[in-house]
Image: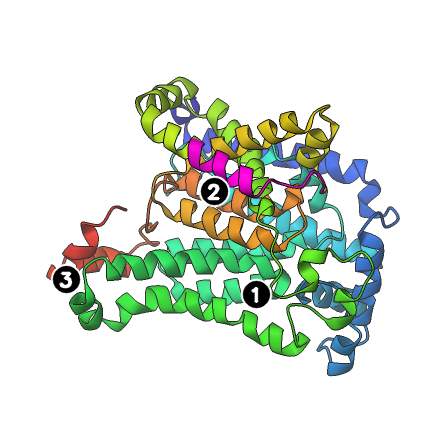
Amino acid sequence: MKVKRIGRSQQRLIFLAAIVAIYSAFVIHLNFLQGPAVWDEIHYWETSLLFSDRLIPSSDNFAQYSELSTPLPFVAFGALEYLFGQGIAAGRWLNLLLSIVVVFIIGWPGKHKTGLSLVCLVGLFTFQPYLWLSGRLYTEMVACFWVLIGMVSYVRNRHLLSSVAFILAIAARQYMIAFPAAIALCEFTALFTHGLRYLRSASLADHWRWIAPLIAVLSIFGWFYLFQGVASESALAKPGTPDVQRSAWALSPGGAIHFLAAVGAYIVIPEFFLFQPLARLRQWRQQWQKIALIAVGLLLYIGMFPPVLEGLGKIAGFAGDLSQYNLSMLFFFSLSLLACIRFSNVSLMSAIFLVHAVLMMKAYPWDKYVLPALLVFWYLKSLGLEERFRPRIVGSGRETGDRRQEKGDRGQHVANLRN
């Protein structure tokens, strides 16, 4: 890619022109977001109206709540209806605005970017559901926005703000817990690697890096208490509720393969073609023994826990259309193998995908569930941090606590970690 050779001001002009063109065409195509509700929008709008009688929801509002996900987006959509009375379009415009903010975070050629942020933006838009969800009354955009804000705050060493953002993300969709959980795991491991003595003598600032995301993780128990379970009783009682979600302890191990296949299809393949594919092939050829071991392990897993040939999105649809069951399994194996190979090195992204895949054992297979991880990946890629174990950048005009810490004797231990 030759984007680096274009000046930053020219990159910004290209960015603004592209975004204005894409979103203008999109809004016009959707009749300025005024069309009737489609698919899940129908019951999502009905749920939003439960929270439209006041700005601060009451216990009565939650008593009638019957969605499987946590309610923050519906509270926001209901508040917009209470304030402006514009119907379903107001919530759609909120999602569109959040989508544009996400695009700016990932694609804007800022001073910390690698010079390839525009290419990362292309990678984002190869995931077709992203733009579609931007103009509909779905809950993903609210959750993904707060996940990305949490990640931006984390890499800028703003751990309190990051924790709050992740708490709000979990309040929008439960599975967003994967991101603070992965961060807490990496940060605690970074300290624990030096031994118990260093762990006990580490400063509060050192521990805060894993305690802050852990607090966000623990916020899920507040929702468990409110719902008296993983979701509201009325939502779990609906006829269409997947069996794996009806019981707190039920798992569908094949769901992890579906998620990894989505990572392979929507992240690994676009990145491969956008960023030096020949160099990636040479790297994989040199690691053939490692790749062989990964393939054997993945094959054994799929043999024991095959992915189900159902779900929503193109992956399940294509696999279901194949004439033979073995071809369907080969399709899932190939895509998930790409994901496992690409993220086989230890990094924050590999930890995110691992935790995320485990959580997807509790979800009905759906391509769109890869969206938050996809956004985080392209954001870190735009900063050149996607391979790091503890991603961080220098804050505006001053050094982060990590950078100052690394200059001291104690920080030298952390500086020697693989990051």
Where does residue 164 sit, x and y in percent of width and height?
49, 67
**Which residue in the rendered view is the most extreme toward the right?**
36
How far apart, in angstroms, are the residues tagged by discs 2 and 3?
30 Å
Amino acid residing under circle 1: Leu
* Residue 208 horizontal/vertical position (percent): 33, 69
Image position, residue 50 (x, y; %): 81, 71
Query: Relative to 236, is 35 on the left or the right?
Result: right
- Reading the chain from its start, which is encountered first: label 2 or label 1? 1
Q: Which residue is mark 3?
A: 410
* Amino acid type, label 3: Arg
- Which residue was labeled with disc 1? 168
The secondary structure type at the circle numbered 2 is helix
Residue extending farthest left: 409
Residue tagged by mark 2? 377
Q: CA distance from mark 1 to mark 3?
A: 34 Å
On the rendered structure, is 416 left or right of 46?
Answer: left
Q: Which residues are magenta?
A: 296-311
State the residue at coordinates (42%, 65%): 213
Residue farthest along the front direction in this orientation: 304
Amino acid tagged 2: Phe
Q: Residue at x 59, y 32 (%)?
A: 332
